[in-house]
Amino acid sequence: AERRRASRRWRLGATRGTDSFRYDAPVKRRHRVLLLLSAAEVLTMSLWFSASAVIPQLTVEWNLDGGQQSWLTLSVQLGFVVGALLMALANVADRLPAHIVFQVSALGGAAFNAAIAVADPSFGGVVGLRFLTGICLAGVYPPAMKLMVSWFAHRRGLAIGVLVGAATVGSALPHLFNALPVFAGAAGLPPWRGVMLAASWSAVLAALFVAIGVRPGPDLPTAARFDWRQATRTWTDPALRRANLGYLGHMWELYAMWAWAPILLLESYRAAGLGDASGRLAGFATVAIGGAGCVIGGVLADRRGRTTVASWSMVASGVCALTAGWLGGMPALLTCVCLFWGFVVVADSAQFSAAVSELCDPAYVGTALTMQTALGFLLTTATIRMVPWALERFGWGIAFAILALGPAMGVVSMLQLRRMPAAARLAGGRG
């Protein structure tokens, strides 16, 4: 029925940008863009943890301490924050074609990431190149969300859930590269350069996918005029502020878990004599399973409400944060807990973005999404660095338990948003 209605609107001559075309484009076009953009997101986001995944190899080769290990991830987060803030203040995502911004950023990120493996820079140079990679990723993630919003006026939670799920799987890809036999090297340590180059070539392929088949959808507003104040309105509007506070609580936990749970799993498997390859595969699965969580969370949020799904997801992930760090001596149980944690920790992520897109001025949805992600990723720099600090002093149990503070704050914010009149604009009135 949906296909027949969409096709009829198309035959009646609905044109891009008019209200009659707002329902969405013909189903085949929407699904083709969903497939291509999601595949591109998987491939490009492999750049994010390309260095973090090879921390064990780099620690041996470069004799890294805990602080230097953290900077391999922190530099990307900071680069993303700087790039996203600049994009938000300049309204880049709302004034330039989002698909072009994506392509240029993906190619730039691929080049900076590859330079680490090819040019053999100093550790300071590596941090600088990772910072530039993060800036480029700011031109990939928020524009991709805006492109998806432009194609899905309805079922938006599911659409953005698929996209965030793709980004989740992409973030896990380097851990998979690191575990594949093709990268096996001496002393059981895969050559790290091959892993990083594989991530860069993945980003190049992503840019090709977007160039071939992704364009802005019919629900995209006309280009917005420059207004730097739009970047601050995400905090002056009460409903948007609560949606963003929920997102910050979610981000307090997410990237620290993604960065360090695979390390705990690897240590646990090594201590039990189960082999490094098995530990790396467990780390990949822990992050990648979040892709399924995003899709299922999107389906449930469109049916049950965004605030409800986000709240339950954060309750479940907070319980896992309080539990996982104490299970290092039981690799089988730790793996089960981490897999469940990886599923729920990101199941709510897309719903914060979908909520902001429904609550903000449609002409500046790109700016609102970019500002949201900028602040969220800025917060992650604190928790990614905090985990090794707490680990050295208190052990894995306390280090991970601290992460539960974020979900607790996020649940409060979501419940407050649910009681506001603006919640009627979420998920077709479901809140």
Image (cartoon, rainbow, N blue to C red):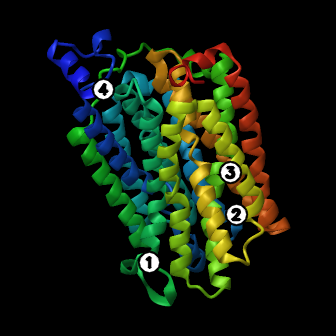
> In the image, residue 90 lies at what x, y percent?
48, 24
**Which is in the foreground here, disc 3 or disc 2?**
3
**Which comes before the other along the chain, label 3 or label 2?**
2
Q: Which of 224/43 is in front? A: 43
Q: Which secondary structure, mark 4?
A: loop
> In the image, residue 307 lies at what x, y percent?
63, 31
Distance, label 3 to label 1, CA atoms, is: 34 Å
Looking at the rendered image, the quarter that the C terminus falls into is top right
Label 1 sits on residue: 191
Above or below residue 109? Residue 395 is below
Above or below residue 231? Residue 114 is below
**Which is in the foreground here, disc 4 or disc 3?**
3
Name the amino acid type tagged 1: Pro
Name the amino acid type tagged 2: Gly
Marks 3 & 2, CB-CB < 8 Å contact: no
Label 4 sits on residue: 217
Q: Which secondary structure, mark 3?
A: helix
Name the amino acid type tagged 4: Gly
Q: Which of 247/52 is in front? A: 247
Marks 2 & 4, CB-CB < 8 Å contact: no
